[in-house]
């Protein structure tokens, strides 16, 4: 297993459903990130965990709930989403301490569609 | 506010050279990244510049001018597999990564 993996790759859910996205990194990194990517828009940083502690929450609605049980795993719990939440959700990881050159490595993303 | 500008889309011919520009206005600067993202795939790291000048890595080169708030990614000997989106991102004074919307590069035979 290499790099950053995400499951599921595709998810269709109704507005009343509850689902979770999973991310796992095999790079020995200490920081993990959730991003939202919508067409023709910049990546939107949602959450950052550094050494399992949440260090960023960029005004994300409470219907998105992150969980980081250890430095290798990151979850994004979803409930009562809206159609405008349909997007590609990307997970990334980085070393976590070389702050300037802290290169992020991305997973393939989960394509989420909210009906 | 903080802003990264790059062209939305560019078209080039196989075997040719293309330059993708990125200009930024950020609160401070701690480095600039270029990523490549093929459709439906993860962004992958291409280059990092923190000092002025040109960094060459095979067919790809990245240039930075901090005084002008400007960078470009130069792709030589274009191949069909270079068709992708190219994302520019800048680390600001708070070590936050500010992303551009990406440039979709279309390579034609």
Image (cartoon, helix red, strand yellow):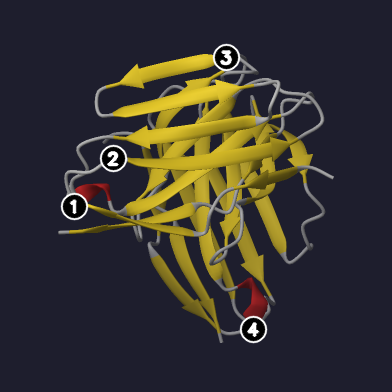
Q: Earlier in the sequence, mark 3 or mark 2?
A: 2
Same-subunit check for callouts 1 and 3: yes
Q: Is label 4 or label 1 in front?
A: 1
In the foreground, A69 or A47: A47
Chain at tag 4: A
Residue B89 in the image: state x and y as whole percent.
Answer: 59, 37
- Find out whether the residues at labels 3 and 2 contact each other: C-beta distance under 8 Å: no
In the foreground, A103 or A22: A103
Q: Which residue is mark 2?
A: B17
Place residue B73 in its image quadrant: top left
In three-dimensional space, the C-alpha distance between marks 2 and 1, rounded to whole angstroms, equals: 13 Å
Residue B81 in the image: state x and y as whole percent.
Answer: 20, 49
User: At x 34% / y 53%, what residue is drawn?
Assistant: B84
In the foreground, A94 or B4: B4
User: At x 62% / y 60%, what residue is drawn?
Assistant: A77
Q: Which residue is mark 4?
A: A15
Quadrant for the N terminus of chain A, please.
top left
Same-subunit check for callouts 3 and 2: yes
State whether residue B51 is above or below residue A25.
Answer: above
User: At x 38% / y 30%, what residue is drawn?
Assistant: A26
Chain at tag 2: B
Q: Is residue A105 visible?
A: no
In the foreground, B2 or A98: B2
Q: Which residue is mark 3?
A: B52
Indicate which disc residue B80 carries: 1
In three-dimensional space, the C-alpha distance between marks 4 and 1, rounded to whole angstroms, equals: 40 Å
Secondary structure state at the residue bearing disc 3: loop
């Amino acid at each position: 297993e290499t790099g950053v993996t995400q499951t599921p790759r595709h998810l269709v859910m109704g507005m009343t459903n509850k689902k979770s996205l999973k991310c796992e990194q095999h790079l020995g990194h200490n920081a993990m990130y959730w991003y939202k990517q919508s067409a023709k828009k910049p990546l939107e940083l949602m959450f950052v965990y550094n050494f399992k502690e949440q260090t960023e929450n960029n005004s994300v609605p409470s219907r998105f709930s992150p969980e980081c049980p250890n430095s290798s795993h990151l979850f994004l719990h979803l409930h009562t989403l809206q159609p405008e939440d349909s997007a590609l959700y990307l997970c990334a990881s980085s070393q976590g301490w070389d702050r300037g050159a802290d290169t992020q490595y991305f997973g393939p993303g989960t394509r989420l569609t909210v009906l | 506010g903080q802003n990264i500008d790059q062209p939305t889309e560019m078209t080039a011919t196989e075997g040719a050279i293309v330059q993708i520009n990125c200009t930024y206005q950020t609160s401070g600067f701690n480095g600039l990244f270029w990523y490549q993202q093929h459709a439906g795939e993860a962004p992958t790291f291409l280059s990092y510049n923190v000092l002025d000048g040109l960094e060459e890595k095979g067919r790809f080169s990245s240039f930075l001018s901090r005084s002008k708030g400007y960078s470009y990614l130069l792709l030589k000997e274009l191949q069909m597999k270079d068709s992708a989106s190219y994302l520019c991102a800048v680390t600001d004074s708070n070590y936050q990564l500010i992303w551009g919307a990406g440039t979709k590069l279309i390579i034609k035979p």
